[in-house]
Image: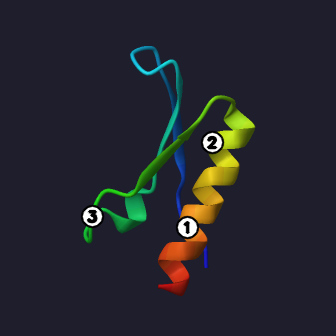
Amino acid sequence: MKYSIVIQWSDEDKCYVVSLPDFTDVYQPFTHGDTYEEALKNAQEVLEMLIDG
């Protein structure tokens, strides 16, 4: 299966903020990272937890 991951820089938070729009019907899952790569890794971990749970 394929899921969308949206990564955006936040000037306010000074980090990359991640949302997973395919899961917004349940709640708004999100994570963040200091780098784009860290944000993507964190998003993948959250996605795995959502799929397994």
How far apart marks 3 and 2 lie (CA) works out to 19 Å
Which amino acid, by three-letter code, is at mark 2? Ala
- The residue depicted at 54 percent of the width and 85 percent of the height is 52
Which callout, 2 or 1, points at the residue further toward the start of the chain? 2
Sequence-first tag of 1 and 3: 3
Query: Residue at image x 54%, y 74%?
Result: 49
**Number of other residues with Cα within 10 Å of mark 2, as a class: few under 14, some 14 to 19, many 20 or more:** many
Question: Which amino acid does the dot numbered 1 rest on?
Answer: Leu
Name the residue carrying label 3. 27
Contact flag, marks 3 and 2 (Cβ < 8 Å): no
Q: x%, y% of residue 2? A: 60, 71
Q: Amino acid at mark 3?
A: Tyr
User: Marks 3 and 1: in contact by CB < 8 Å?
Assistant: no
Please name the residue that numbered disc 2 is placed on.
Answer: 39
Residue 7 versus residue 46 in the image, above or below: above
Q: CA distance from mark 2 to mark 1?
A: 12 Å
* Other-residue count near label 1 (Cα within 10 Å), few / some / many at <14 / 14–19 / ≥20: some
* Quadrant in which the N terminus appears: bottom right
Question: If you read the primary sequence from the N terminus, does the residue marked by circle 3 or circle 2 appear first?
Answer: 3
Q: Residues within 10 Å of mark 3 (few under 14, many from 20)?
A: few
Q: Which residue is the site of mark 1?
A: 47
Image position, residue 35 (x, y; %): 69, 30
Give the left or right position of residue 22, taking residue 32 as reference: left
Q: Position of residue 13 (x, y in %)?
A: 43, 21
* Residue lying furthest top: 11
**Secondary structure found at label 1:** helix
